[in-house]
Image (cartoon, helix red, strand yellow):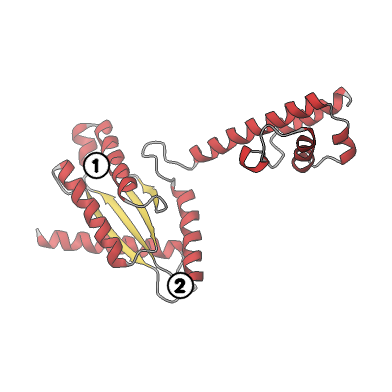
Amino acid sequence: MAGSRVRAVTQRIDRGRADLVADHSLLGDWPPGESARRDILASILGLPDAAIAEIPDATAELLVDRLVAMSARLRRLEAEAALDELTGVLRRGVGMRLLQAEVDRVHRSNGHLTLAFVDVNGLKRVNDNDGHAAGDSLLQAVARTLRRRLRSYDLVVRWGGDEFLCVLSGATLDEARAKLTLIGAELHQHMGRPAISVGLATLAPEPEADDDAMALVGRADADLYAARQVQRLAR
């Protein structure tokens, strides 16, 4: 293969123009043999068979190794970009896309889905009195408890500065309320004061055209506001 063609293929890979799907789970036996390497390059780079046939064995092996390394690196970067740096839960944009996908899935299956809008109590006061490091520790403690006490497939999303969304797929309103009550009690015991306030909303039993992710968040937020109003009146 001419040197210019090798450079062109290498540059094409470096620019990330290929669909980098070459990871060990998709490739089967590792390392792949000569024929498999050429099949990988043909499918990922979109080059004609004649061009693939001209690639020397050593070059094909090098290119596939580079594709695998880049694929793994991109997957790590994508995973890191989806997470909030401070709390380790999902960022808002990613979380909302996943929530909408869950809403669509539940509508198709006529299942259950309950959303919890979780507000961290007194974060501003902690920041003002004890410093932002203490406020960060509070947020991290709440996020850590939510992740630990909810199921591995329940989504936890950082909605705003002191707010989280928890997506409990398959959970009824009563089941979600019981779970969040236990989480609130644990945080209360750990911190010596009520650490979170919670609003809940569930999907309508029958799918409605306007019952999307944002509508669900809005209802959970309204429920949180109502709960806070009751707490104020009770003081």
- Mark 2–mark 1 distance (CA, rounded to whole Å): 41 Å
Residue receiving disc 2: 110
Between residues 20 and 116, which one lies in front from this camera angle? 20
Please state which amino acid type lies under the numbered disc 2. Asn
Marks 2 and 1: CB-CB under 8 Å?
A: no
The picture quadrant where one finds residue 88 is top left
Q: Is residue 92 above or below residue 35?
A: below
Helix, strand or loop status at disc 1 = helix
Q: Quadrant of residue 35?
A: top right
Q: How packed is label 1: few (under 14 Cα within 10 Å), some, or many (20 or more)?
A: some
Per the rendering, the mark at residue 96 is none
Question: Residue 124's mark?
Answer: 1
Q: Residue at x 68, y 29 (%)?
A: 66
Q: Is residue 21 visible?
A: no
Which badge, 2 or 1, comes first in the chain's sequence? 2
Where is residue 71? Give x, y as percent.
Answer: 63, 36
Measured as percent of width and height from the top left, residue 186 is found at: 20, 48
Instruction: Note whether 121 is above or below 64 in the view shown.
Output: below
* Quarter in which the C terminus is drawn: bottom left
The three-letter amino acid code for the residue at tag 1 is Lys
Outermost left residue: 235
Is residue 50 visible to the viewer in this orientation of the structure? yes
- Residue at the image position 49 percent from the left and 49 percent from the top: 94
Kind of element beneath mark 2: loop
Quadrant where the N terminus sits is: top right
* Residue 65 x %, y %: 69, 29
- Give the side of residue 55 with respect to residue 120, left or right: right
